Image (cartoon, rainbow, N blue to C red):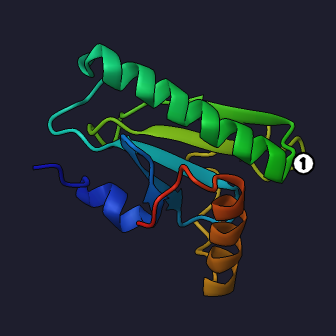
């Protein structure tokens, strides 16, 4: 049975589910930072998903990327599956601006995380729910 890695559970806020992946928000309002986690047991790398899963992951990542680009109008959208700290396969989608506090460097370790206020979380959920209507299920 699938379970979310404890570090991801601690650092994120559940936003919803696609067909394959959970959609999570990193609880760091310094950056709009979302994470997709395929709901498959013992998967560490994209190539470990079967063909259907790999295609579905790319589709869901692309859908999220288009939504984030439309909502936030970033200068750059960083998408990566790193897994150096958390071995469970997860794909970061980080909205970046040339004026953000870490630019042009990676976001990790630049600033202490700044947790979201509940009103901010609610606003982001509404925006994404409207943009991803019909494809994003409740968390």
Is residue 106 at all visible to an observer of this figure?
no
Q: How many marks?
A: 1
Q: Residue at x 61, y 52 (%)?
A: 33
Q: Residue furthest left?
A: 1
Figure check: 108 above or below 106: below
Q: Quadrant of residue 126?
A: bottom right
Residue 65 pos. (x, y %): 67, 37
**Of residues 98 and 40, which is closer to you in this image?**
40
Q: Quadrant of residue 86?
A: top left
Residue 38 pos. (x, y %): 33, 39
Q: Residue at x 56, y 51 (%)?
A: 34
Figure check: 65 above or below 11: above
Residue 78 pos. (x, y %): 66, 33
For residue 39, side relative to residue 102 (left or right): left
* Secondary structure beneath label 1: loop
Q: Residue at x 62, y 42 (%)?
A: 64
Q: Residue at x 61, y 31 (%)?
A: 62
> For the C terminus, which image quadrant?
bottom left
Figure check: 7 above or below 53: below
Figure check: 120 above or below 26: below
Q: Which residue is mark 1?
A: 99
Residue 134 pos. (x, y %): 57, 53
Mark 1 Cα shell of 10 Å, populated few (<14), some (14-19), many (≥20) = few
Is residue 22 at all visible to an observer of this figure?
yes
For residue 35, side relative to residue 51 (left or right): right
């Amino acid at each position: 049975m699938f379970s979310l890695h404890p570090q991801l559970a601690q650092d994120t806020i559940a936003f919803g589910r696609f067909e394959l992946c959970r959609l999570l928000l990193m609880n760091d309002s310094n950056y709009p930072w979302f994470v997709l986690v395929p709901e498959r047991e013992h998967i560490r790398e994209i190539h470990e998903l079967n063909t259907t899963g790999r295609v579905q992951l790319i589709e869901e990542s692309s859908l999220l990327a288009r939504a984030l680009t439309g909502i936030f109008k970033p200068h750059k959208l960083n998408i990566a599956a790193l897994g150096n700290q958390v071995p469970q396969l997860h794909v970061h989608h980080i909205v970046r601006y040339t004026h953000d506090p870490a630019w042009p460097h990676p976001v990790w370790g630049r600033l202490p995380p700044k947790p979201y206020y509940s009103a901010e979380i609610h606003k982001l959920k509404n925006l994404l729910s409207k943009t991803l209507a019909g494809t994003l299920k409740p968390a």
